[in-house]
Amino acid sequence: MELKGLILAGGAGTRLRPLTYSSAKQLVPVANKPVLFYGIEAMRDAGIRDITIVISPGQPGMEIRKRAGDGSQWGLKVGYVEQGEALGLAHAVLTGEEAIGESPFVVYLGDNLLRDGIQTMVEQFKSSQPEALILLQHVDDPRAFGVAELDGDRVVQLTEKPSEPRSDLALVGVYMFQPGIFDVCRSLEPSPRGEYEITEAIQALIDQGKRVEPHVVTGWWKDTGKWEDMLETNRLLLDAIEPQVDGELIDSRIEGRVSVGEGSTLERCQVRGPVAIGAGAVLKDAYIGPYSAIADGCQIERAEIENSIVLENSKITDLEHRLEGSLIGRNVVIGGQNSKPRAYRILVGDDSKIGIL
């Protein structure tokens, strides 16, 4: 049984503004790789070779098309469909019906990451061939999630964000379906928030007596929709980074697991891993501390950075204090100078967050 893949990569990404005013949230990188690419690679590693990405119209969708291309960089076939309006996950799934056809398929939310991928779940789905297989994980506060109740190896009830949860098993952003799910999605009515909910579609399968199987995820799972989650995911991924130095070190010291990209230069720097530094970066008289990801083309001079993500071609210089727990966008300039009296001079866009600690 050959499965196809459907990656949902629409949505406005409001929780990651201002980064997502000009870029799709699924392309914001963690450990110097776009979040979306981890999902594509998870599908590839599970043997899926035909993937459709559901995108928003306009600039974010165009950027995803440009970055992911036709899938040849992964040895896959990648196509695209547009979701004209963000009307919920079930609506997004229905948008992919023509591309999926009569194949069973995997739905993967494009801003989610699973440490151990989806290969085991795909094998379970192929073996038992249920109408649907859903991924679940034990969570501390299930009230913030869709919650599943189980009876042995079957799912018997799904409840969206219950005030009094009857289990601690939350739905993870990966689902596997037979093509019959499309008819179910078509039959749905909008929820109170005006969306067509995938949890309601799965519940309809259960109510029809169809077999819906659970798979409880034991490794970590992260939804990177908020900047705090981006930083946490960055830390988790950097914990597994392979040390490799392809750039040039001049009077610099590296400790721990550090990756330095081709064409980068580190002069009089101290780097304590785990750290990822992209290609073509220039660092001088800088300290880069654990759990930092510095993207391609960045310039960092006379500054200290720790537990932060800095995106492409940003410039950070002459900071009096260490930059910690920060998410810095593309082409950002942050600079200090040694003149006195000290003052702040700031130009920021809508929805920015600045902490002076």
Image (spheres, grey):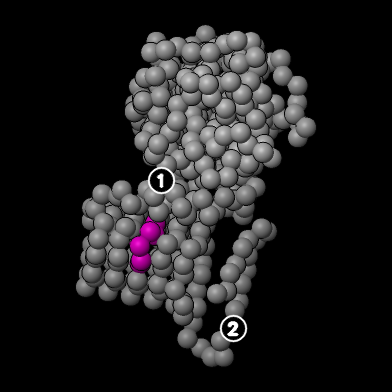
Q: Quadrant of the N terminus?
A: top left
Report the residue at 35% width, 62% height from top: 290
Residue type marked 2: Ala
Lower position in the chain sequence, tag 1 or tag 2: 1
Position of residue 170 relative to residue 105, above or below, is: below
Task: Tell which of 316 and 103 is nearer to you.
Answer: 103
Are there few (<14), some (14-19), or many (20+) residues within 10 Å of tag 1? some
The answer to whether residue 330 is above or below residue 178 is: below
Which of the 4 image quarters holds residue 219?
top left
Q: Position of residue 198 (x, y in %)?
A: 63, 26
Residue 2 can be seen in this image? no
Residue 294 % position (x, y): 39, 58
The span from disc 1 to disc 2 (Cα, nearest Å) is 35 Å
Q: Is residue 9 found left or right of 220 in the rendered image?
A: right
Q: Residues within 10 Å of mark 2 (few under 14, many from 20)?
A: few
Disc number placed over residue 335 in the picture, else none:
none
Q: Which residue is identified by label 2?
A: 343
Is 135 contained in the magenta span?
no
Point out the image quarter for the C terminus: bottom right
x and y, in percent, of residue 29 in the image: 45, 48
For residue 147, side relative to residue 333 (left or right) = right
Q: In the rendered structure, which segment of residues is drawn in magenta?
A: 288-293
Residue carrying label 1: 33
Residue at the spot 54% in from the left edge and 37% down from the top edge: 168
Q: Secondary structure at mark 2?
A: loop
Q: Give the percent coordinates (x, y) of residue 45.
A: 34, 28
292 magenta-colored = yes
Label 1: state its secondary structure.
Answer: strand
